[in-house]
Amino acid sequence: MPDIFDEIEEDLRADRTRRLAKRWGGLALGVVLVAVAAVGGLQAWRWKEAREAATAANTYLALHRTAEAPGADLPAVADGFSALAREAPAGYRTLARLRAAALKAEAGDSAAALALWDQLAADAQAEALYRDLANLLYVGHALETGDAAQLAARITPLTQAGNAWQAPARELAALVAIRRGETAEARQQLQALAADAAATPGLRERAQRLAAGLGS
């Protein structure tokens, strides 16, 4: 008798398994297929991303060599970097924008350079390191012509401890203070920078000279 009950129970389990397989088997297969497709899609995306990065790298290096060649047409090369920035992956897009702005400034087109730095500084998708650098370069090139209050607002956050551009930002902050007529504040900032062992020797020496030039 126990054997008969065992056989009946096994039959019931087998029947239940068949019914479950019929009911959910298609769904399980679909899940597997979706997972396989997702993995395949991820691999394809990574391959596409790697190919785009390699293409951007080659274009960037070619433009860089052109810019460094004697008699280079800097505005044209800057336009090339700007075109690359519109198509390249995020990393190269940021580098290309910085290079385009630098070449515009070198060619004497300050307005275009400032516009590019301003765009990068406001781009939330760019890394903070490069946004801060864009602000630093903007202030440095707009020091004589820009609104002093706006320049101070751009440069002050960069002077905080831990910022990668803290030392040069402190120098620029002092120069902005001079433009605003805040001579005592500027002298104090420059003296502190001149005594900062973490700053480069050249920067400390320049800060010391500037502080001395402001008198006591």
Image: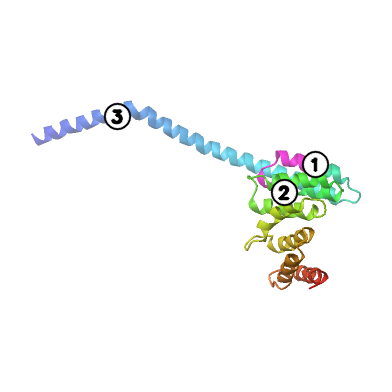
x, y percentage for residue 67? 84, 49
Q: Is residue 209 magenta?
A: no
Residues 42 and 75: in front is: 75
**In what element is the residue under mark 1?**
helix
Report if the CB atoms under discs 3 and 1 are less than 8 Å apart: no
x, y percentage for residue 86? 72, 39
Q: Specify the label residue 20 is tagged with.
A: 3
Residues 198 and 88: in front is: 198
Residues 72 and 187: in front is: 187
Q: Nearer the viewer, mark 3 or mark 2?
A: 2
Q: Residues within 10 Å of mark 1 (few under 14, many from 20)?
A: some
The residue carrying mark 1 is: 80
How is the model colour-coded?
A: rainbow
- Residue 194, relative to residue 16: is it above or below? below
**In what element is the residue under mark 2?**
helix
The amino acid at mark 1 is Gly
Q: Is residue 96 visible?
A: no
The residue carrying mark 2 is: 95
Q: Is residue 91 magenta?
A: yes
Tell me the residue at 71%/63% (across/down): 170
Q: Residues within 10 Å of mark 3 (few under 14, many from 20)?
A: few
x, y percentage for residue 156? 68, 57
Tell me the residue at 68%/50% (across/down): 131
The magenta segment: 80-92
Q: CA distance from mark 2 to mark 1?
A: 13 Å
Work out whether mark 3 precedes mark 1 in sequence or the reverse, and give the earlier one.
3
The amino acid at mark 3 is Leu
Specify the quadrant that holds the N terminus. top left
Specify the quadrant that holds the C terminus. bottom right
- Residue 208, relative to residue 51: is it above or below? below
Tell me the residue at 71%/42% (across/down): 55
Q: CA distance from mark 3 to mark 2?
A: 57 Å
